Image (cartoon, rainbow, N blue to C red):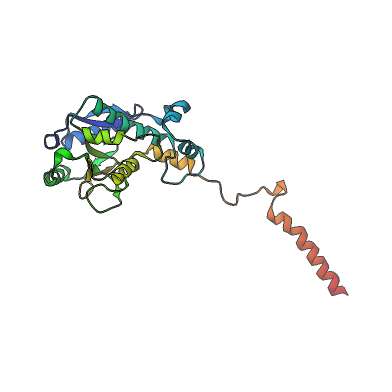
């Protein structure tokens, strides 16, 4: 597969503390036709200092990270900051080294059975390959039907990106406000004609059901307290405790009226 796309490098983003993921995913990437895949240490959001986060995020994002709960669209946890910076790290490397193109995977990628043949078939249908910015083949969902990326989408399990595409994505990458996949879609929507990005007709790769640190962080920060938390009756705050004396008084008044 690498022979078809002819990337100068194939990278897989993986955290230093996720060696097990790399051990599982590397053979899958090799089997998919990318034998020279290289592990790129991702940016661990948990290890970022508050000052490092402040340098790359907006006031809105920092507020949202601290808030409980968050809306689903904005960046809502430090893991998403680290994921975003990991992709930026690769884009910068592509530009710095003046690499013609590169293939990027995340370490939870899973390939469809016909990945190699389907990607080859789709690649051969693309026109003006020398002018494109990239090709997303590992994504979860795209909002619009056209194969040219013109709106936000979810998932960056695998994609091909050119030197021009990396430069385009680096033009306005900060301050961070949304996850990196949504950011890429927004850039494409605002400027779809220049250095266009494309989707394969269907996703050719998806994600492994690992216990994602980002998912865990979202689960933690989105746990809201119950709307009506239980009250300890001994504290005097029980609703039943409030109504009992009133009921007793009401019954006494009724009895007095009956006696009369």
Q: In the image shown, does 87 or 254 lie closer to the viewer? A: 87
Q: Position of residue 2 (x, y in %)?
A: 14, 34
Quarter occupied by the N terminus = top left
Left or right, residue 63 beside residue 181: right
Q: In the image shown, does 182 or 164 lie closer to the viewer? A: 164
Looking at the rendering, which quadrant does residue 185 occupy?
A: top left
Identity of the residue drawn at 45% across and 35% down: 58
Left or right, residue 18 beside residue 255: left
Q: How many marks?
A: 0
Q: Position of residue 4 (x, y in %)?
A: 12, 37
Q: Is residue 112 visible?
A: yes
Identity of the residue drawn at 84% across and 73% down: 257
Left or right, residue 118 beside residue 63: left
Q: Position of residue 97 (x, y in %)?
A: 22, 24
Left or right, residue 10 beside residue 4: right
Looking at the rendering, which quadrant does residue 248 occupy?
A: bottom right
Quarter occupied by the C terminus = bottom right
Looking at the rendering, which quadrant does residue 167 occupy?
A: top left
Q: Is residue 154 visible?
A: no
Residue furthest right as drawn: 260
Q: Is residue 93 above or below residue 67?
A: above
Q: Position of residue 192 (x, y in %)?
A: 26, 45
């Amino acid at each position: 597969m690498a022979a078809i796309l002819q990337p100068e490098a194939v990278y897989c983003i993986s955290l230093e503390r996720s060696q097990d993921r790399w051990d599982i995913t590397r053979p899958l990437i090799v089997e998919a036709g990318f034998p020279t895949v290289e592990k790129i240490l991702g940016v661990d959001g948990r290890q970022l200092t508050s000052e490092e986060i402040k340098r790359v995020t907006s006031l809105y994002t920092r507020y949202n990270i601290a808030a409980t709960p968050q809306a689903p669209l904005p960046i809502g946890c430090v893991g998403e900051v680290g994921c975003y910076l990991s992709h930026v790290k690769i884009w910068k490397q592509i530009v710095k080294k003046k690499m013609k193109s590169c293939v990027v995977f995340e370490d939870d990628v899973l390939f469809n059975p016909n990945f190699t043949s389907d990607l080859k078939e789709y690649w051969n249908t693309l026109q003006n390959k020398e002018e494109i910015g990239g090709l997303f083949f590992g994504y979860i969902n795209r909002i619009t039907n056209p194969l040219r990326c013109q709106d936000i989408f979810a998932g960056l399990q695998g994609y091909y990106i050119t030197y021009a595409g990396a430069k385009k994505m680096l033009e306005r990458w900060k301050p961070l406000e949304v996850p990196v996949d949504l950011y890429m879609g927004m850039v494409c929507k605002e400027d779809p004609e220049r250095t266009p990005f494309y989707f394969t007709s269907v996703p050719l790769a998806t994600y492994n059901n690992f216990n994602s640190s980002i998912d865990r962080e979202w689960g933690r920060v989105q746990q809201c307290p119950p709307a009506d938390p239980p009250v300890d009756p001994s504290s005097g705050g029980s609703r039943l405790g409030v109504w009992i004396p009133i009921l007793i008084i009401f019954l006494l008044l009724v009895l007095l009226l009956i006696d009369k």
